[in-house]
Image (tube, rainbow, N blue to C red):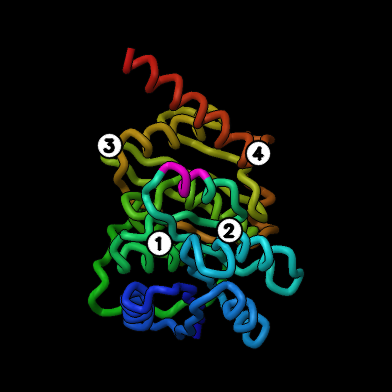
């Protein structure tokens, strides 16, 4: 059973998260300070840490750095919950946390997002509950998919980063309102993309921009053995972070042009 450690000095807030994770089938442990969280991690390594941004003894970002500094715990997924103030959001972006999430977001949304990321990392998570809505198949290949989700819950950049961190090989199929596209990963590295008769980096950029504009659609990840992925087309040689940075610049320039 996947285990999550909730680090929160607010008993009411932590109780809501605890109930949401337990309802989804997770085993939950609690800590009310950074020092108690570190002791808990050493006693029993969790699959996921969800932490508030500040405690009496340290910041959540400091806790994250300590977890990352230990070779035995550095791979634990870390989610930092922050308030909506600019200062705290800035602090959060400077941490090593895997995901930064608004602390007042619905617990069910947080659970859905981290569940998807854990699956992409190869962590065995609880099976979907009967109350969970089924996501439409992304393409005719989707019946063999091991993971599907909504881009409204987890955007394309987060999905791609989760596949990369998990060092997965496979085909990430994207279904938008009018078009379908795909990215191919080999051991976590994106090696090919196709979208709207484009291939390579141009298709990758167009896919990310289209998903950003639409902010909806679905994704389906179809795993492949590394030896099978090695025979697929290779049209991209840049690393994922460089690709995403280039797209971010392109989106920013477009937004400023439209604003002007």
Mark 4, residue position: 234
Mark 4 is surrounded, within 10 Å at the Cα level, by few (under 14), some (14 to 19) or many (20 or more) other residues, namely some
Label 4: which secondary element: loop
Instruction: Locate residue 21, reporting x and y percent.
Output: 38, 77
Q: CA distance from mark 3 to mark 1?
A: 25 Å
User: What range of the chain is rendered magenta?
Assistant: 86-90
Q: CA distance from mark 2 to mark 3?
A: 41 Å
Residue in the image at 35% along x and 50% along y:
151
Task: Point out the tag, 4 or 2, that comes first from the N-terminus.
Answer: 2
Mark 3, residue position: 178
Q: Is residue 85 above or below residue 179?
A: below
> Which circle marks residue 113 in the picture?
1
Label 3: which secondary element: loop
Task: Point out the tag, 2 or 3, that comes first from the N-terminus.
Answer: 2
Task: Point out the tag, 3 or 4, that comes first from the N-terminus.
Answer: 3
Instruction: Locate residue 226, reporting x and y percent.
Output: 67, 59
């Amino acid at each position: 059973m996947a285990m999550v450690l909730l680090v929160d000095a607010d008993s009411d807030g932590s109780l809501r998260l605890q109930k949401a994770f337990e309802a989804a089938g997770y085993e939950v442990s609690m800590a009310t300070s950074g020092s108690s969280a570190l002791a808990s991690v050493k006693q029993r390594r969790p699959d996921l840490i969800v932490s508030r941004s500040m405690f009496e003894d340290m910041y959540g970002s400091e806790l994250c750095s300590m977890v990352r500094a230990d070779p035995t715990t550095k791979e634990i997924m870390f989610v930092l919950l922050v308030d909506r103030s600019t200062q705290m959001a800035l602090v959060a972006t400077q941490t090593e946390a895997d995901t930064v999430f608004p602390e007042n977001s619905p617990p069910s949304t947080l659970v859905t997002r981290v569940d998807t990321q854990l699956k992409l990392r190869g962590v065995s998570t609880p099976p979907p509950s009967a109350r969970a809505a089924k996501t439409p198949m992304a393409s005719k290949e989707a019946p063999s998919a091991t993971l599907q989700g909504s881009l409204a819950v987890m955007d394309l950049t987060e999905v791609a980063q989760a596949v990369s961190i998990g060092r997965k090989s496979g085909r990430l199929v994207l279904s938008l309102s009018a078009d379908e596209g795909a990215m191919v990963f080999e051991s976590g590295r994106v090696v090919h993309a196709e979208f709207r008769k484009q291939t390579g980096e141009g298709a990758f950029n167009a896919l990310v921009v289209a998903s950003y504009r639409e902010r909806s659609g679905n994704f389906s990840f179809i795993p492949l053995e590394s030896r099978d992925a090695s025979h697929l087309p290779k049209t991209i040689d840049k690393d994922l972070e460089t690709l995403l940075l280039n797209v971010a610049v392109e989106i920013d320039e477009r937004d400023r042009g439209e604003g002007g």
